[in-house]
Image (cartoon, rainbow, N blue to C red):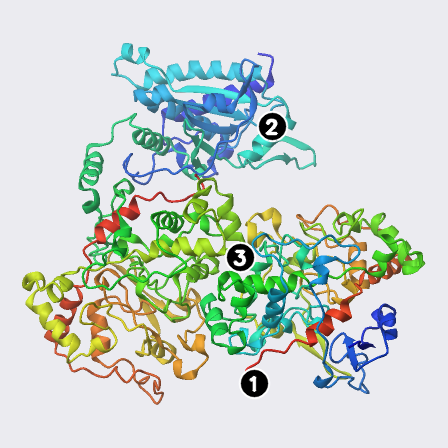
Amino acid sequence: MTFPGIKVGIILLAFCSALSHAEEVVPASEREVQVQLLAPGYGALNFPLPKAGSYSLPAFGDAADARVLNADGEYVNYHDIFKGKYTLLSFIYTRCTDVNGCPLSHLVFNRVQSEGNKIPAIADNLQLISMSFDPENDTPEILKALSQEDHSAHEGHDMSGHEGHDMSAMAKKKEVALMYLTADSVENLMPIVDDYDQTIQNQINEDGTQSENFSHILRVYLIDPELKIRNIYSVSFLHPDIIINDVKTLMMAEGMIELPSDIAALAKTQAEAGAKGVRVGASDSKEGYGTEGYETNSRAIIARKGVKADLIRVLETAPLGLPKVPVPENNPVTEEKVDLGKKLFFDRRLSLNDTFSCAMCHIAEQGYTSHEMERAVGVEGRENRRNTPTLYNSAYLSRLFHDGREISLENLVWDQLTGRNEMAMTSIGQVIDKIRGIEDYQGLFEKAFDGREADVLTIGQALASYQRVLVSGNSSFDRWYYGKEQAAISEQAARGFELFKGKANCIACHSVEEDHALFMDNKLHNTGIGFNVAYAKAPETERMNIAPGVYIDVKRSIVDKFKETIGDLGYYEVTQDPDDRWKYRTPTLRNIALTAPYMHNGSIPTLKDVVAIYNQGGYPDDGGIMKNVTQSPLIKPLNLTEQEAEDLVAFLKTLTGDNIEEVISDAFSTPVGDTQH
Amino acid sequence: MRTRILISLAFVATTSLFASYANADNHGADIVIRVGPGDSKVGYDTKDYKTDSRAISARVGEQTDLLKFVKNPPLGLPPIPQPERNPITDEKIQLGKKLFFDRRLSLNDTFSCAMCHIPEQGFTSHEVVKAVGVEGRSGRRNSPTIYNVAYLTRLFHDGRESTLENQVWSPLLDHREMAMTSIGHVLGKINSLKEYEGEFERAFDGRPVDIETLGQALASYQRVLVSGNSPFDRWYYAKEEKAISVQAKNGFKLFMGKAHCATCHVVREDHALFTDNAMHNTGIGYERSMGKEPEAVRMPIAPGIFAMVKQSHLDELGHTGPIGDLGFYEVTQDPDDRWKYRTPSLRNVALTAPYMHDGSILTLEGVVEFYNKGGIPNVTQSPLIRPLDLTSEEMNNLVAFLETLTGDNVVELISDAYSTPVGDTVVE
């Protein structure tokens, strides 16, 4: 042993294997280590992992190639080594003494190896690669010695760690491979270090000379056989249980390891159920979240599957209760445009930081709106002033947005794409150039638009075409009222409809015609909600549900810091006419049971509460001297009894279209555009 | 009718540049074009200041054939690039010009494009460091000139837009600029104005105003606002020895050599755009983000009367959006692009004060001094920006050279702009 580095390597190794035998033991030999907080990788995991196979690990980029040296001093390429294998890639240097740096990586690798060896698919297909970023010291000779030491230490560990196993069977099995690589020079190392975002700096001694130690932030990569990066582990998450779980999950997706029976059963039900299997509503219904005994009913991402539907057929025959779908002369709907628009709609890359698609506020299974927040939240958590409106039946709207500021679906799309608090693209041109630069859009616009590429016109036309066919009718109400099916709705709902057009006079704005019902008048009205927000005194504290059954009262001044403070004057902002203050567009009531929370600002959580506001006559004043002078004269106290209010709600619940599951399933069948593509 | 064009010398710096126009033809009605603000404000810092403001009625001009610049680009400039989808026609130029000067294209009918891009102020705005839009809302950056935008491949100071056609929607819809609330709002408004009846259909082969044609019309006007054939061009490209002074020639030598200006402000064999269409960090943005702000600023509030105003008060005024400014980073989200801004052309630079993306340097002398000291060093600063060791005489030479870059059609373009009626709610 003539290389000083090898000794260090062996010390390091001995230290690691000592630890791996006694999980909770702090190494007594490393005094300075004791004061340092040990990374979770040294101990047992202190939180339960999700079941392997119950989640997915989307690729977030390609693993870069590099030409490096192996322990035999031969030149090899990353891609040749990675291809066809699952790889963990760690960057280390053998002289490393930072307990939460390279020794941690080494220890975790050893444990992953011994755990992985128990699972044949992992033993056969997983490799653990330690890449040195200290080529001057970590020469192939040193790596060779290290891997030999490694091997014998591991053998010993494996023997003692798995008493009771059938050793002859173990011997026949393949092992998770351990491999050491290095660069041939610092110069050739640098691009690799850059490609894998390794922050590495030489430490400086107190006397100003360069130390042999490096400052290094551990980042370990999980790479799949297709050379895609599937996870990156920082110190806090570099734990053998997590890694094994992730590797299992990746292999389950490829059928290399069997899915756990419950997850497999779920997936099977989904596949068999097809369109009918989708869950309508948030992925976790949060029913009973207000109580301590709450248990999540959240479903695995794998269950979010669907089948493509023939959306365009609503153009030929509108669903019962709805008129013919209006289509602009210069943008006839075609299947190519709908498919392209749908692809764009679900593409997260259409946002400034590649994270946010249209579908993330207009969530298909949540009524193409968002149940879980009152007001929309865009990229980087930027808050908006208003509730996400549903896209169902937007084809029939002649004014768009709550304040009616836009008139066509085609032009509307630029508002979200370039809205700073929404998708935050910085210009129309940036959107166009980005789409033109994405490989999976090559030729699609030309195909849908007669040779015309993605531009200011065609992008709007494609997105509008998808939204235009999200038509939903033939509800229980429609079958009862237009289809004359007596039993389609309950007697209570029928009584509710009588109130709707009579005593409660809802129909004055939420129109119902002879042969169809849009349940809106395409006009703007002041109900008092906006006025009330502007003038009513907000309570001193706001009660917040921070965990199941746990509430805290948060001071108004603190709540306000997180809220968009800009006021909201509704249609006035468009017309600048004071008479238009706090006027908002009448929303359709179709699918209203699916689009909570309600009103332009999402301030009312249930239909019952909405009816109560109208029953009280909106907000004609602020309780003091300030009058809401622009409130619609149609909004006045209704004197509905409790029973009548319930009847109204029962009626509103009959307005859900019959194609909801089909449309959701169609949405689920669309791949989510992401940087991995 | 031939026009006699007199020049009022609003800028001391521009005196020599416009002397030649004063000797224009002597027939017909007088049209007096002043280059510079309505009130030059020379001597405003003294109590005996008297305004030289002119009556609005003096703001008259004569329409010119802008299409001729397409047929024959001015000396020193390449042919005007035309997008395949939007060939330039006279109808589109006239329609775009009408839109450009129409105040009704703003939310409250008060604000046109031309109110930040003021023709007689170099199609920019001398009197505000950073643009101010409807209702006095402050923008973050200086109004860039419209001259020679046809040649830009990146638009806005942060380069976020790639075509003039799409670019127009940004100022029309920005809350701090013209503040229209949506694309449909703009289109609906134009549709309701009877002066535009049939105009789009005429210019666009039967097509009405829409998201595309509106941009195409406005782009067509801006695209022909090219300005070259400057004294520099006549000297450098046409070999007129006397077109510029010896001092300016020395300045050009420095520009190409010791001062390295031409690395980014590019001059080619047969033409000079004086820009590389690329993004660089000079340090101005870094200083604004990271540097210490003065606690108070001395401001003239009336002739000869100054007040110290706290910076914190100034920060509160008129801001309705994000105040920080990270330049190209905001577009790419790449930290290496922090504080990078597009290289502006230097053509007509004598007419486009104040300077830099935030209008923070008031004079060309100030700009040259800034570069001479190597800008403000910071981690993403362009390695091209470094101390230049120019003597004060050399700096003067550079400024003299920069003043030779004013095009020969400046007055003609202003006069053409004046001939366009300002779209207003009172216009019948």
Placement of B151 over or under A138, stated as above or below: below
Please determine if labels 3 and 1 lie on a single subunit. no
Q: Which mark is residue B139?
A: none
Q: Which residue is mark 2?
A: A189
- Specify whether A300 is left or right of A428: left
Discs 3/1, front = 1
Label 2 to label 1: alpha-carbon separation? 70 Å
> Decide: marks 2, 3 in contact (CB < 8 A)?
no
- Specify whether B318 is left or right of A443: right
Residue drawn at (33%, 84%), measured in percent from left and top? Answer: A622
Residue type, numbered disc 2: Leu
- Specify whether A324 is left or right of B167: left
Of residues B78 and B162, the one nearer the viewer is B78
Q: Which mark is residue A427?
A: 3
Placement of A638 over or under B379, stated as above or below: below
Placement of A254 over or under A295, stated as above or below: above
**Quadrant hosting residue A525:** bottom left
Which percent across, then down, holds residue A202? 63, 34
Chain letter belonging to callout 2: A
Which percent across, then down, holds residue B264? 74, 49
Element marked by disc 3? loop
Q: Which residue is mark 1?
A: B426
Label 3 to label 1: alpha-carbon separation? 33 Å
Placement of B342 over or under A436, stated as above or below: below
**Quadrant hosting residue A50:** top left
User: Does any portion of residue B126 appear in the rendered image?
Assistant: no
Which percent across, then down, holds residue A574? 44, 74
